[in-house]
Image (spheres, rainbow, N blue to C red):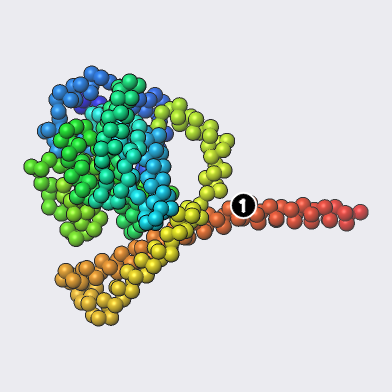
Amino acid sequence: MADAKAGKDAKAGQGDGKKGPAANEPKAPTGSQLDKMYEYDEGHITQLRQNKPWEKNNKFFNKTKVSALAAMKILKHSLSGVKKGRAGKSGMAVEVMGMLVGKPDGDSIVVSDAYPLPVEGVENFVDTGARAERYMTTLLDSLEKLRKEGYVGWYHSHPFDVETKSNCFMSATDVGTQRDYQNQFPVWVAIVCDPLRSLAKQEPQFGAYRIYPVTYNPPVNQAPDGTNGDKEDLVARWGHAYSRYYQLDLSFYMSSLGNKLLGIMSRNNLWVRVLSSSAILEPEYRERLPERFNKATQKLDSAARAADSGGYGRGWHGGGGGKGGKGKDNVLNQGVLACSELATEQCKGHSSQLCKDILFNALKVAMEKREKGGQKDDGKKP
Ligand SMILES: [Zn+2]
């Protein structure tokens, strides 16, 4: 039964991998197929818990399906941490944390809802104090009265500055936290949200992860998403604990009713909001922009200094330079990437503003002129 369900999931989730921007957009449900996500198949879940397929396969759970509601709540909570932190004494965005509610379904972990926890901190210091524990227990008690689903994981935010790479990864502390949970509750996923990149790129930036058992060592130089790279690059993108966890394919879902309602809202109201909003005009984006320009310039400066001092050597010409040469190439690459990302965001933002200006202002003026001209012409005619 589990296999049959897993096969069905694989079919439903085709192309849902977190590969491109479109992959992160909520998928339109096909009839009642996605409404089945809301059903709680007690027999299937009991069988899964008895068979424990995760004990035989280190990467048994390889998909996470997040409801649009849960995704919205996670993103909203993560952004509130940015806003609150920036307004506070330190001026630093704060990390937030919460719990995920859902169920296992074949090789997927379905997240149907998310609940913020009264926990705030900075990376490496997430205060999972007694207050949070009490809150979690009370929350679970109330949840059990209302629904059959239970906790299936936790989420937290990485509100770090927008760089050339996503900040969705697991730090050594995160891996430790996930290990504690996963040992106790095998059906457990960790979702990391990058709120500032979500804002800059205008699409949710989430990563879903699980850890490997301590006895298992993945192939050397393998990244959590299954790609290969140099250790230096892997550490920079995925953190020092990159070999201890793996990434799950993340997709979003919505009920057919929710989809219908969203369609009506989009037709009636939401299109106005979409048309009037612009990432480059968001206060948060504008405030951080000078700092991002500054960082990109610093990277280019240090690459230029290295080039002046002849530091590039063979590495600069791509002739297989030593470690030092590669390190400096990386600095240049990072600088170029940061600049091109900034340029793309600005071009995209300004082009859309220009289009809106033409649509709402220039076109209106042109039409008014034409109308006036038409009236004058009419007057001149005998
Ligand atoms: Zn973290």
Left-right relation of 28 to 372? left
Helix or strand or loop: what does disc 1 sit on?
helix
Q: Quadrant of residue 353?
A: bottom right
Query: How many marks do you count on the picture?
Result: 1
Horizontally, residue 351 falls left or right of residue 363, namely left
Residue 120 point in image, percent of width and height: 32, 45
Q: Quadrant of the C terminus?
A: bottom right
Q: Residue at x 27, y 20 (%)?
A: 41
Q: Is residue 334 above or below residue 111?
A: below
Residue furthest to the top: 43
Q: Which residue is mark 1?
A: 359
Does the closest atom of ligand 1 sit within 8 Å of the Cβ of label 1?
A: no
> In front: 219, or 103?
103
Query: How many residues crowd around disc 1 within 10 Å: few (fewer than 14), some, or many (20 or more)?
Result: few
In this rendering, the answer to whether 177 lies above or below 283 is above
The quadrant the N terminus occupies is top left
Which amino acid type is shown beneath numbered disc 1? Leu
- Residue 63, image quadrant: top left
Query: Outermost residue, right direction?
Result: 382
Q: Is residue 210 above or below residue 110?
A: below
- Foreground pick, 307 / 141: 141
Q: Is residue 32 something that shows in the picture?
A: yes
Q: Position of residue 131 (x, y in %)?
A: 29, 37
Q: Residue extending furthest left?
A: 215
Q: In the rendered view, tell whether residue 380 sits above or below residue 180.
A: below
Residue at (41%, 61%) from the top-left corner? 342
Res 249 visible: no
Q: How far across and down, in percent of the image, does residue 106 sit?
A: 23, 29
Q: Give the residue drawn at x 62%, y 52%.
A: 359
In the image, is 156 to the left or to the right of 380? Answer: left
Which residue occupies 38% across, 25% down? 35
Is residue 20 rendered to the left or right of residue 265? left
